Amino acid sequence: MFDVVIIGGGSAGLAAGALLSHRGFRVRLLEKDMFLGGRARSEERDGYLLDYGMHSYRLGENGPLARVFRELGAPLQFIGPHRLSSYIFEQGRLHELPDTLAGLLSTPLLKWREKPRMLAVIARMMGAGTERWYPRTLTEFLRIPQMTPGLRTLTDLMALTVMAESPDSVSAGEVIDLFRKAVFSRRKVGELAGGSAQIIGALQKILIASGEIIPGTRVTGFAFSSGRIRAALAGPDEHEARAFLYSAPISGLTGLVPRNLLPPEIAGFADRLVSTSGLSIDFGLAAPVTGILGAIFNQDPVVIGRFPSNIDPLRAPPGKQLSTWLRPITFPITREKIEEAEKTLRTVIEEIFPGFFSRVEWERKLVLPVMDGLSMQPGQDFPNRPASSIASIPNLFLAGDTIQGKGSGGDIAFSSALSATDIITNYLSNTNG
């Protein structure tokens, strides 16, 4: 019998599996697809190394991903300078975004009368209690009665740090928490050589050292005995273990566990869950377009661009360039929204970089019905997300980007994996059989 059976081979499941295996437990991971990593997977194409959409590892060495690998004894090596200058396209030109106090005082994005007001906002964020502001929007926190264009630009960008399009719809507590951590972090965003493939491959290798991974295995339910789960059911097979970790989106849990066994708050959260969606397009460019290392933002409409090969030259063949662009789409996704997003994305790219499409050798379009497992809106904020343990089912635990964990998107997945691993370790250490 295994110590732990993990359902789901995305970032959270692989991270938790590797951590548990590293701690000496026997782990079996079941993944419904034939590939691992979920949206964190990578692929090669014509000498380019492509991630599946855009990924950000916030806070670099201080982020949850780095903490996972430090415990595993395999610290990650982030590449590129600690400061990756990002830009916003405003009034027909690119402006560097300020990420220091000196930059804020000198930026042309703000007029002189706007700068003291922005400094006052930052001072309030540094002293605010996040618990109070998790259930309220960033607009409510800002309390700016007359929003000027410059202030609107920077406060909208605050929302975009957690992939929310507007301060009106994002949890103020989530933005404040990330902002305060970023202030004291030397690296705001980390980039890895080889992209996501480095992470998935390393976690997989550590997990199978004392465990196993079975892809193409869809779990359809659980068998219970004496109030605990005895086995995960996958077709005719039963996968028995002492503990079970569900690391897939929480919305799927109600299809595996009878609703009367789940706390109402978990079932209700699963029913109400709102994810983020988007359209991502990768472009293989015959010649470089720009040397920008950080992100490029357009705010109205929201479009985000990156040139990954500027930081990691191995992501593209010599003399060529890889570029990835994203247009968020309001959840749920529809064909009409996808068509509008593609038209908008292409228009914005050409406005920022005239002649861009004359250098395109190929492109890959990805429709992402679920980009991040949840949007960072009030009600889906950290305190309102399900915790890693379930009191009514003592040996079932939760991880993933829809569970309690600090950060946004993939950061939540790694943060929740760390928490779930500690809780499972404690459970197994204090439970016989």
Image (cartoon, grey):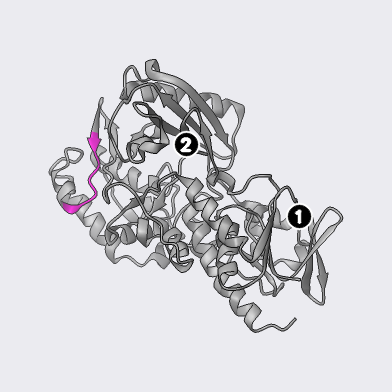
Mark 2 Cα shell of 10 Å, populated few (<14), some (14-19), many (≥20) = many
Quarter the N terminus occupies = bottom right
Q: Is residue 58 left or right of residue 379?
A: left
For residue 336, which quarter of the picture? top right
The magenta-colored residue range is 95-101
Q: Position of residue 33 (x, y in %)?
A: 68, 45
Helix or strand or loop: what does disc 1 sit on? loop
All told, the count of numbered labels is 2
Quarter the C terminus occupies = bottom right
Q: Position of residue 175 (x, y in %)?
A: 38, 55
Q: Indicate whether residue 97 is drawn in magenta.
A: yes
Residue 114 appears in the figure: yes
Q: Which residue is mark 2?
A: 49
Helix or strand or loop: what does disc 2 sit on? strand
Q: Which residue is mark 1?
A: 219
Q: Indicate whether residue 430 is drawn in magenta.
A: no
Q: Is residue 127 left or right of residue 48?
A: left
Question: Residue at the location (79% across, 54% down)?
Answer: 220
